[in-house]
Image (cartoon, helix red, strand yellow):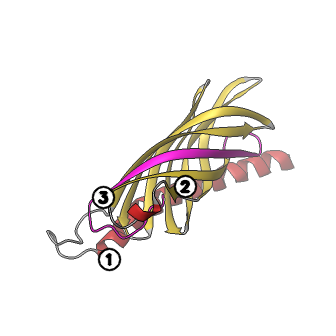
Amino acid sequence: MIQVVTATRTKRVLQLTSRALIVVSLCLPIAAGRALAGPPGSANDGPASLAVGAGVADRVVNGSGGVAFPLELTLTPAPIFFTSAGAVFSGGGIDHAYLEVGVWLVASLAAGVGYGAYDSPEGRKDGETIHLFVGVPIPFEPDRLGNDKWLPYVEPYYRPSWGPWPGTVHEVGLMLKVSYWFKDVIGKIGG
């Protein structure tokens, strides 16, 4: 009986946290961008940058590791804030689709929500997820930082996530990303 109550309570907390993080992830970048933006049509109107990336990762689910392939799109609406949407693929299909919001202060730090799935002995199970993200963007050519609209970089990262799978999923990977700066380049490459 205690396990059923605990499982129900945990599921409810995950649902409420997921909904709250979705609202925050949609509102925070907009609010930050508006707070730092000038009037419409000014140099500070609109997003700062857009980045696309793909990579390879080791995704450990229930003690068993496997190769996964993340794809991600990152929008930086204001200098230190970013929001990303992505998906992690493996042989079983989409393992994790997510939306995250974060800050870049030398390292990229984020939290997010999403939907995930894993293969269990009873078949494929899916449900809501929450996760954290820590990445360290490293530009290929540091002298281009702040001097070019295009900036390719590599980002080693760690993403622990909690969802329909038992325990914590540990994802460690490397993404190749390219940022395009719509505004004056300010030297931020995170996300």
Q: CA distance from mark 2 to mark 3?
A: 28 Å
Q: Between residues 111 and 115, which one lies in front from this camera angle?
A: 111
- Amino acid at circle 2: Gly
SS state under label 1: helix
Rendering coords of residue 143 (x, y %): 42, 64
- If you read the primary sequence from the N terminus, does the residue marked by circle 2 or circle 3 appear first? 2
Residue 76 sits above or below residue 5 on the image: below
The residue pinned by badge 3 equals 149
Q: Are marks 3 and 1 in contact (CB under 8 Å)?
A: no
Q: Are marks 2 and 1 in contact (CB under 8 Å)?
A: no
Q: Which residue is mark 2?
A: 112
Q: Secondary structure at mark 2?
A: strand
- Label 1 sits on what residue type? Ala
Q: Secondary structure at mark 3?
A: loop
Q: Which residue is mark 1?
A: 35
Q: Residue at x 60, y 56 (%)?
A: 133
| Residue 157 badge | none
Q: Residue at x 72, y 48 (%)?
A: 8
- Quarter residue 33 falls in: bottom left
Task: Examine the rendered structure and indicate whether residue 35 appears above or below residue 76.
Answer: below
Residue type at the position of mark 3: Lys
| Magenta residue check for 176 | yes
User: Magenta residues, as a range?
Assistant: 163-191
